[in-house]
Image (cartoon, rainbow, N blue to C red):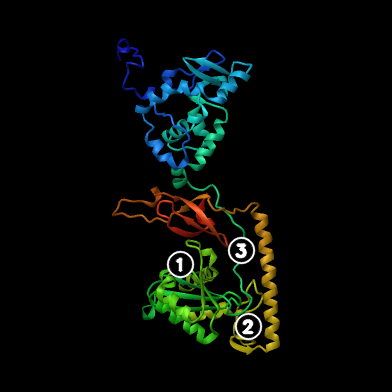
Amino acid sequence: MNIEAVSYVPGVDNTVADALSRYFKDCVCPSSTYIVPMSSVPTPFITCHSITVAAEAEVIDTLDSENFSQWFKELPKVQSIDPELSILRDTQRTSRITLIDDLYHIRGRNNKYRIFIPYKIRYQPVAYCHKDAMHPGMNKTVDVIHRFFDWPGCREDVEEYVHICEICNQNKRRLHVPQGDMHNIVAFSKGELLAIDNFGPLPPGRGGVEKLLVVLDVFTKYVRLYPCKKATAESSIQALEKYISDYGLPRTILSDNGTNFTSHEWRRHWHEREVSLRYTSVYHPAANPAERVMQTIAETIRMQVHDDNHGKWPMLIPSIENKINMNVHSTTGVSLIILQCQLRPGIGGFRLLVPVTLPEYIKYRDKTRYNIKCKIEQRQEQFARKNKETIELMPGDIVYVKTHLLSSKEKHFSKKFGKLFKGPYIVMENRGMNCYRIQDPSNQACEDHHINNLKY
């Protein structure tokens, strides 16, 4: 290597900077204070008064070197009329504020002088440094800003900006899942509320069935299982009509937002039958009590089929259904079949059922209602101990909605690199049961989402 060929080129003449010239790095200085040279300041900043969050994208797009010279020329003028800087100059007895190269500097962290940024143009350095550093957290963004600039309350301003940064909210995971108040889905009489859901798709079984319609009476916890070929409105209606012929017409049906449960045919049929329909929040299966039954069904089938032919699952459904209904439920404290059919297992086991007299049934029913109320109180206490704070969003709050993407090999798209959240959206209304109606500002479309699917 020819050492003599190495020469110093001033920054003014070096129009194409090398990798070592990109950022000014802190160094150990013999003096107690350090002054940031003007030639070390990065060049993508502009002047803007009263910039709002909604204008962030437009501001970021204009943060380039072409606008820097104008911004830098106006910086002394903006400093001269800044009331906060004027107060600091008049009240500071120490040398915290000093004038260097026609720019006021403020002494801050590590006893270093950095260029003072007036209030009206603080958004620009925060926005650019946060973007240029690839959207880090608050501490790292502050470190980047403090290489050149400083002002009172810098950390608080950065924290506020990082919290509302649209790109960060869309692509970064939540540190915690929002937790609303606990609401129990309960009923206190038979037929008051039916919870239904589709289990599948499953391996094709006898008769070509691939789905299983799960029907749960929320009060008695009684379960009926109906294998079907497809999860259509017609097949679901037929299965529920079989249930109704055996146990009577329910008052309310609770389901998810599957197409078979939201179709015009489904809604029209139950409207004619004077049965009200309720729906869970989208992408929130925990709001449907039938989901817990489906876990039991899956576990039981898994233990029965092992690694054999999985297509034999329809033959197991009658025995699974009977054994679930014969058991005593942990919430009610009563066998399911007693509350639903006024029958109880006899001495001979599952195959022998003994009728329950009316006084006995009333006794079991009252016991069940009491146990349900006690269980609700117990769960509320456990929830209160585990969750110290609950969230209640207000109309006008800004939120983001969790996305549910699928990878596509044809489109060269991986869900691992897709946005985790979409938005921002505006909270319009609290629908109850931790469900909120939100609006997309771009097209005014409204959706209902559970708080667990929101980021705020």
Residue 152 position within the rendered picture, expressed as x and y whole percent measured from the top left: 57, 28
User: 355 above or below 209?
Assistant: below
> 357 left or right of 130?
right
Whole-number angstrom distance, CA of label 2 to CA of label 1: 32 Å
Residue topped by disc 2: 338
Q: Are marks 3 and 2 in contact (CB under 8 Å)?
A: no
Residue 339 position within the rendered picture, expressed as x and y whole percent measured from the top left: 62, 81
Residue 272 position within the rendered picture, expressed as x and y whole percent measured from the top left: 47, 81
Residue topped by disc 3: 183
Extreme residue toward the front, this view: 81
Q: Residues within 10 Å of mark 2 (few under 14, many from 20)?
A: many
Whole-number angstrom distance, CA of label 3 to CA of label 1: 20 Å
Whole-number angstrom distance, CA of label 3 to CA of label 2: 27 Å
Camera-side residue: 259 or 303?
259
Q: Earlier in the sequence, mark 2 or mark 1?
A: 1
Q: Earlier in the sequence, mark 3 or mark 1?
A: 3
Identify the residue shown where x is 34% and y is 22%: 17
Camera-side residue: 219 or 428?
428
Q: Are marks 3 and 1 in contact (CB under 8 Å)?
A: no
Identify the residue shown where x is 59% and y is 22%: 87
- Viewer can see residue 42: no
Residue topped by disc 1: 257
SS under mark 2: helix
Task: Place residue 129 in its image quadrant.
Answer: top left
> 84 left or right of 261?
right
Q: Amino acid at mark 2?
A: Ile
SS under mark 3: loop
Identify the residue shown where x is 66% and y is 88%: 356
Residue 262 position within the rendered picture, expressed as x and y whole percent measured from the top left: 43, 70
Q: Residues within 10 Å of mark 1 (few under 14, many from 20)?
A: some
